[in-house]
Image (cartoon, grey):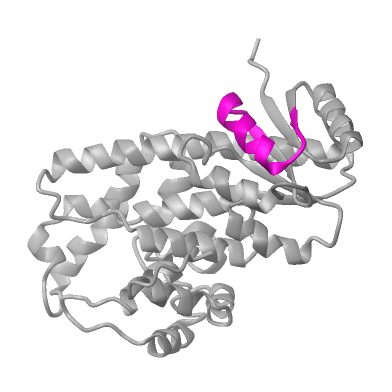
Amino acid sequence: MPERRTILVTDDSSANRDLLCGQLSTLGFWTEAATNGEEAVRAARRLKPDLILMDIEMPVMNGHQACKQLKSDPETAEIPVLMMTGFDPRPERAKMVEAGGDDLIVKPIPMRDLQVRVRALLRLKELRRDLRSTQESLRELVKKEDPTESKEPFDDRVAITAQALARLIGLDAEDQEVAFHAGLLHDIGQIGLPEELLNKQGSYTPEEFAQIQKHTILGAEIAGPFRPATVLAPAIRHHHERWDGTGYPDKLQGAAIPMMARIVAVADAFHAMITDRPYRPRHTVAKALEILAAGSGTQWDPRLTAAFATSSLPQRIAGVVEGDSAKIA
């Protein structure tokens, strides 16, 4: 018999707590309750629940403050947090994202909606665990293949940007998590390429470029044996496909290119443009956006490039690249 999951319900209203705990018990979960954010933080550290339902408007410590504390603590950072509000959710969503919350729902919560959101976030927790495990295993593999750590196949900035872009276009928390890890691991196949080729200044010969192209196939093969390969490998293999079908390795076109690969392609291209390379100095943000606009509908998904260019993401990303501590969210 599978182990019953524990859910921590945090709300300053005893009626709301009792209602939610009753509904969750009916769905087969164990429940614990807290009356404010401060109690929730203490309870979460003690219980390590599988999920936290967190009301926003509470005394002592509100939900956003509590969520931020939980997400900044390695002991509780991986626990999904479903924020709850009885008011207009639109002004709360940006605060939720900044605090690290995983989803937001409006009270009163119908039983069916509660069931769907809870089960989705529990799947998210399992996915996070699998993706973290994959990341650690691949880092160990890279250390064995490259003991001097001269290559850098993990790209935190592309990961964060891909996650932010996924959030920007309205993808759910699970897809945002996949986008992060796809961005982080998209160039893992580079561990199979010669270092002198990766660091070459100037243009590649046709033979050298053909060798470079193999990193997408190799990367997907490296990720393949791991459990989340079904969500990561397509993004790794196809992040150099082009919207017009002239990319590599499989010349996929338009919507046939996996969404995660399209997201990573935009994030990767923008970072490449605003970063110094062996073969050229960095571009300004304005120039990078100009290049993205010129390639919209030919190289990149036009929906993604339009959303990216009209948001504040490019400026925030550039600030991080230049050493600003501002968070990309």
Residue 38 painted magenta: yes
Please tell me which residue lies in front, 291 or 101: 101
Look at 65% across and 43% down and name the residue there. Answer: 81
Position of 166 relative to 129 (above/below): below
**Highlighted range, magenta:** 33-51
Q: Compared to 46, does 37 lie above or below?
A: below
Q: Nearer the viewer, residue 156 or 32?
A: 32
Q: Nearer the viewer, residue 297 or 1?
A: 1
Task: Identify which residue is drawn at 57% across, 51% down.
Answer: 175
Question: In the image, is 105 to the left or to the right of 217?
Answer: right
- Split into 4 quadrants, where in the image is the N terminus? top right
- Examine the structure image and report whether residue 36 is included in the region drawn in magenta: yes
Image quadrant assignment for residue 235? bottom left
The percent coordinates of residue 63 (x first, y second) are 70, 49
Position in image of residue 253 (x %, y %) = 49, 68
What residue occupies the far front of the structure in this picture? 60
